[in-house]
Amino acid sequence: MRKGLLLVFCFWSVLLSLSGQDTVKDSIEVVTIKSLRIFDESNNTPLAVFKRDFTKNNFLKAQLSLQEYVTEAPGLFSLNASNYAQDLRISIRGFGARSAFGIRGVKLIIDGIPETTPDGQGQLDNLMLSTVSSLEVINGPSSSLYGNASGGVIYIGTLDNVDKNYLEAGTTLGSYGLQKYSLNGGWVSDNTTVIANYLFTGLDGYRDQSSLEQHAANIKLIQDFDSGGQLRLGFNYTNSPIADDPGGINAELVAENRRQARDRNVLFQTGESINHTKLSVHYETPLKVKNTSLESYAFYSARNFTGLLPFGFGGWIDLGRDYWGAGASLTQKHIQTNGVISSKIGFDFANQADDRQRFFNNEGVQGDQTLDQLETFRNIAFYYLGSANFGKLGVFLGLRYDINRLEAADAFLSNGDDSGTINLSNFSQSLGFNYSLIDGLSTYINFRQSFETPALTELSSNPSGEGGFNSSLDPQTANNFELGLSANGSKLNGNLALFYVRSQNDLVPFELEEFPDREFFRNAGSTNRLGIELSGQYVFANNWTASGMYSYSDFTYDDFFINGNQFSGNRLPAIPIHQGSWKLAYQTDQIQVSVQHRYIGSLFTNDANSVEDNAYSLFNVNAGFQFPLGSVELKPFFGVNNIFNTLYNDNIRINAFGSRFFEPSQERNVYVGVNIRL
């Protein structure tokens, strides 16, 4: 690990020494969509990209889950917002819906630094939501941009602008024992900006055994150079000693008492604790070569995880993870009389090492060891991205080759040596065309690919009961065909997309009677996914904004026959056919108010489609005020979620044995708070 860190920062030093260049006076102003990795002077792109800015209204939110930020994104569906031991489950066009915990199949990028590990697993428990300033979502396969597990992309920007020095303290209190206390500060001088944040979060939880305790701290340093370059340094630390898991229960137990935890989860004291540290550096600068720029990054994160599951053998997990990587790219623009051609070449490197140990869980007490193995996932990728705009026509091309090497080194040799190596490489392509119909209105068409390898946790969950990897699992692949219409004006922006995705070897979870409560994975033949996504935002009258989205998702298994069961033609579980939302917001410098409605259609809980979860609607409202009091600025705010006290399930545990599919969500809940800025 130390050698790896040395290589990363040696590489970084070389890049810095090469990049002390003069300002390029005739460089082109780029658009703000950062998730595409390559930009031009036009806001039109041949992809469905959703973007929202939260700079002025982030403080209105309870800031307990990223779900509060993504509900307006079409084609994106989220579950599990209130089980903090499992993290938010996000799916985009069905990718990620099967995740047992964390975010799978969707690439997470924060301030240009990958948050998703190279095996495709992502967590956001170390993201301080109070710092979120912007959000971008790319819908559908995007492996030509980001490689493995890029069935969609979520690019999060955090606060980086400070107008003047400030110190801010805040508190939020709410239903079910919610307590949040924060201390934030910003300092700016000449070309240097420093932002620091601390947050404590405590929560009893709606259900029994669902409490949370977390401490988080962030520091960001931004240095602008006279040459036009910018250096960003980041530090993040998260300590969460308590995140309990109440587990899934069946429909009868939900009707009996929806706030109860599953009895075995109580018996085995299920939950997790984490300790997470991350360091990152990002640098970009223009070069002496005309219209050429360099961008590079490096990072290191260490994560210590202890998880207790509701069974004995192997039910106590200790995991130590080292994850580090680096990347660099060169972008060049060719300006011609009839258009602009942009090209980017680059590479990404990432190394993940999981020291996984399992023990007996003797009803909340650590017992004898059952597994000890070091699992590594190493990725190196090379990519080319190109865009061209000639008058009304735009073209986008993406090519990427990923080399993945997975290895399990078995150190628990009393039952034999189950060490092994797997090589999973892939070539991904994307091609898109955009045509401007009139000013502010364009149409586009694209073809894109994605691949998704099994995660290390999925490979190590072996139905044989032995160590090593489950070698029967294959990567999941998909092709996406899309036709869209995009509007981008001063008052109206929106997107309409019609798409078809064909996937092969979908990875789906299941449970076995001989291993109760333990989740395994298998490939599921192929799927067909037809969909429509519509979103829009309209500014009308003075200070009023209306926004909304609708998604139609007809996702079915095309070929899935397993253990004598024919599931072909069945719908993919945990994804509603229909979902939508609308929001009405009023905003001035002093007052901000919004009302939102969400509709989630019915969905199935298992591959057999034998149990259906009902549709539901939710109404939320929040409001905030900003006013000076002498030299102090006060920001009181409040929110009411689930105003009409709808009873619904916050999470679905797919294919759970014993029909324990449901995790009931909280009823009407409120929060109030105030921030004081000096």
Image (spheres, helix red, strand yellow):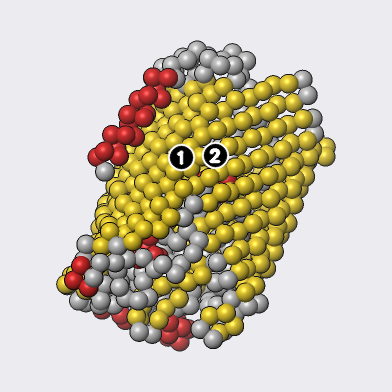
Q: Determine crowd level at label 2: few under 14, some 14-19, many 20+ residues with C-alpha closer than 10 A.
A: many
Question: Residue, x 50% and y 67% (percent of image)?
Answer: 507
Mark 1 surroundings within 10 Å by alpha-carbon count, few (fewer than 14), some (14 through 19), many (20 or more): many
Residue 649 visible in the snapshot? yes
- The location of residue 130, given as percent across then percent down, is 42, 45
Q: Which secondary structure lies at badge 2?
A: strand
Q: Could you tell me if residue 596 is visible in this image?
A: no
Q: Tell me: 320 left or right of 386.
A: left
The three-letter code of the residue at mark 1 reads: Asp
Ranked by sequence position, the earlier of labels 2 and 1 is 1
The CA distance from mark 2 to mark 1 is 8 Å
Q: Is residue 483 above or below residue 251?
A: above
Identify the residue at horizontal 64%, vertical 50% (top origin).
448
Circles 2 and 1: CB atoms closer than 8 Å: yes
> Residue beneath label 2, please?
383
Three-letter code for the amino acid on which mark 2 is drawn: Tyr
- Looking at the image, which residue is at 44% across and 20% down? 19
Furthest residue toward right: 438
Residue 278 figure quarter: top left
Residue 162, position as x, y percentages in the image: 44, 28
Query: Which mark is drawn over residue 348?
Result: 1
Figure quadrant of the N terminus: top left
Residue pictured at 66% horizontal, 60% vertical: 501
